[in-house]
Image (spheres, rainbow, N blue to C red):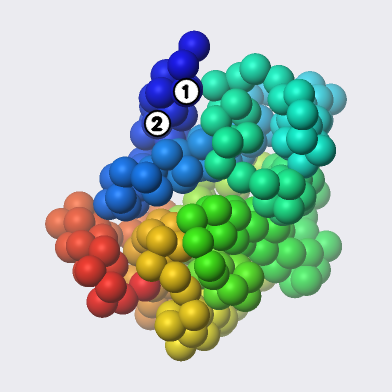
Amino acid sequence: MSSSDDLMACAEIVQKGDPDRFAAVLAAKPAARDVLLPIYAFNVEVARAPWVTQESMIAEMRLQWWRDALEEIRVGGFVRRHDVVTSLALAIDGEAAEVLDRLVVARRWDIYRDPFEDAAHFESYLQDTAGGLMQVAAQALGACPVEVAQDVGYALGLANWLRAIPALEKAKRVPLLDGRPEAVAALAEAGLARLNRAQARRGEVSKPAAQALLAAWQASAILRQAVRMPERVKDGTLGQSEFAKRASLIMRRVGKAY
C-alpha cells in the first residue's frame, strides 16, 4: 500500500470519527493535512480503544498495542506496518512519540468507572490527552511554545468534554468532580482563561503551526455558552449551529480569533 493510500485511510478515520477536526484539517494547507491526518487518526483510534469492548483486559491490550507502536517510532528503525502507524512515523519524531504515549496512558481512565481522584487528576487528563495532541500537531508543523499549544488544547478538550457529559454519564462514568451549575461555569471560565492566555501569545506561534490551532475554532464559543448557561451541559445542548460553526471556522482561518 502506498503512502497516499495510507493518508486516505487516515482521512477516512478522521472524517468518520472526528468530523470537527476533519473540517479544521480541510481548512489547512495541503502540506499540513498530510501531517495532521495521521496524528488525528491516531487520536481517534486510541480514544475509541477503551469503548469497543466491555473487557477491561482487552481494552488495556489495545492501548498497549499503541504504546508499543509509539515506542518503535521513538526508537527509530523498524516500525510495524499499519495505515495509521506507518503514516504517523513519517509525521512525528521521538519526542512527539513520548508526548503521545502520555496521551495513551491517560486514556486508561476511560476503561474503568472510577471517578477522577481530584481536580489535579482531571486537569492532567485533559492536558495529557487534548493538550498533548495539540502540542504534537502544532509542533509537527512549525514553531509553537508548548504552553500555548497546551492551553489551546486544554480549552478544546474541556469544551468537547462538557459536550460529552450526557453520553459519559449514560455509560456509567463519573465525568465531573462537581456537577453543580456554578461549578461547571467556573470550570468553563478556567478554560476560557487558558484560551485568552494563549491568545496573548499568538505572535510566538509560526504560521505553519497555527494551522493546527484551527482545531479549536469552536472552543471559545462553547465555553462561553457553558459559563452563561451551565444547565446546557447536563441537557446535552451545548454547541453551535452549522452556520455559526462554518462562520467561526472561516474567522479562525483568516486569523481573526481562536
Label 2 Cα neighbours within 10 Å, binned few <14 / some 14-19 / many ≥20: many
The x and y percentages for residue 69 are 74, 30
Q: State whether residue 1 is above or below residue 144.
A: above
- On the image, the x and y values in percent for residue 203 come to 43, 83
Taking the spot 77% from the left edge, 55% from the top edge, the residue there is 115
Identity of the amino acid at label 1? Ser
Instruction: Give residue 151's mark.
Output: none
Residue receiving disc 1:
3
What residue is drawn where x is 43% and y is 80%?
A: 202
Query: Is residue 199 visible from the viewing direction of this image?
Result: no
Depth check, front residue: 56 or 126: 126
Determine whether, in the image, residue 59 is placed left or right of residue 16: right
Camera-side residue: 174 or 129? 129
Tell me which residue sits at (44%, 58%) in the image. Answer: 212
Label 1: state its secondary structure: helix
Residue visible at 55% across and 21% down in the picture:
83
Label 2 near label 1: C-beta < 8 Å? no
Quarter location, residue 177: bottom right
All told, the count of numbered labels is: 2
Q: Amino acid at mark 2?
A: Ala
Say above or below: 113 vs 130: above
Q: Tell me the number on the disc at residue 11.
A: 2
Instruction: Report crowding for label 1: few under 14, some 14 to 19, many 20 or more residues within 10 A (C-alpha).
Output: few
Mark 1 or mark 2, whichever is nearer to me:
1
Which circle's residue, 1 or 2, is located before the other in the chain? 1
